Amino acid sequence: MIKKTEKKSQVSMFISLKDTLDQKHSLSILAERINWQQFEEAFSALYCVDNGRPALPIRLMVGLLILKHLRNISDESVVEQYSENVYYQYLCGQSEFVAHSPCQASESRISLARDKLVLEMFPFIPM
């Protein structure tokens, strides 16, 4: 006798990245504890609203900078590792996994003034 196939509901292809991660992972915890709005407010004045090339999201850029300093790696390395590490992506504000780099390494360079501002907000990040 052939066993009847059970009807199984299809799992959504669009599961949130947050739902798939270990919420006890240090980068998951950090992503939830950071006041991202504070960065939006601090950096939004540095961008022109109606002129120039569209900017990358502030959370992405700040997240890359935080990861760069936490891991003590270069701009090139943090951009390369971003496409391989879902925790990096979650920290930087992604809601779904992406298999490509968020930007060119040259675009991830943030001026020393912004570095300094971020490090003042997070003094525990090693320089």
Image (spheres, rainbow, N blue to C red):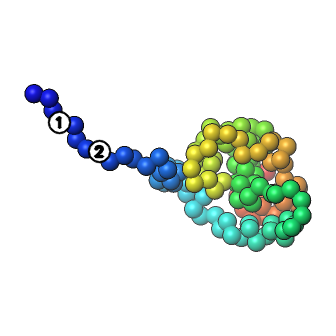
As drawn, which residue projects farthest toward the left? 1
User: Within 10 Å of the Cα at label 1, are there few (<14), some (14-19), or many (20+) other Cα atoms?
Assistant: few
Residue at the spot 63% in from the left edge and 39% down from the top edge = 99
Q: Is residue 24 among what the camera can see?
A: no
**Does 2 appear above or below 91?**
above
Residue shown at 70%/59% (left/top)? 59
User: What amino acid does circle 2 point to?
Assistant: Lys
Give the residue at the far top of this rendering.
1
Q: CA distance from mark 1 to mark 2?
A: 12 Å
Q: Which mark is residue 4?
A: 1
Which quadrant of the figure contains the N terminus?
A: top left
Specify whether 65 is left or right of 87.
right
Q: Give coordinates of residue 98: x percent, y percent.
A: 62, 44
Secondary structure type for disc 1: loop
Q: Quadrant of residue 58?
A: bottom right
Where is 43 relative to 72, above or below?
below
Q: Is 35 situated above or below 97?
A: below
- Among the 4 quarters of the image, the one containing residue 28: bottom right
What is the secondary structure assignment of the residue under circle 2? loop
Residue placed most toward the observer, 26 or 53: 53
Decide: marks 1, 2 in contact (CB < 8 A)? no
Along the line of sight, which residue is nearer the eye, 28 or 51?
A: 51
Judging by the rendered image, the residue that carries numbered circle 2 is 8
> In screen coordinates, is 48 left or right of 33?
right
Mark 1: amino acid: Lys
Q: Give the image location of residue 87, x and y in percent.
A: 58, 47
| Residue at 57 percent of width and 62 percent of height | 32
Q: Position of residue 51 (x, y in %)?
A: 89, 64
Q: Is residue 79 visible?
A: yes
Q: Is residue 17 left or right of residue 46?
A: left
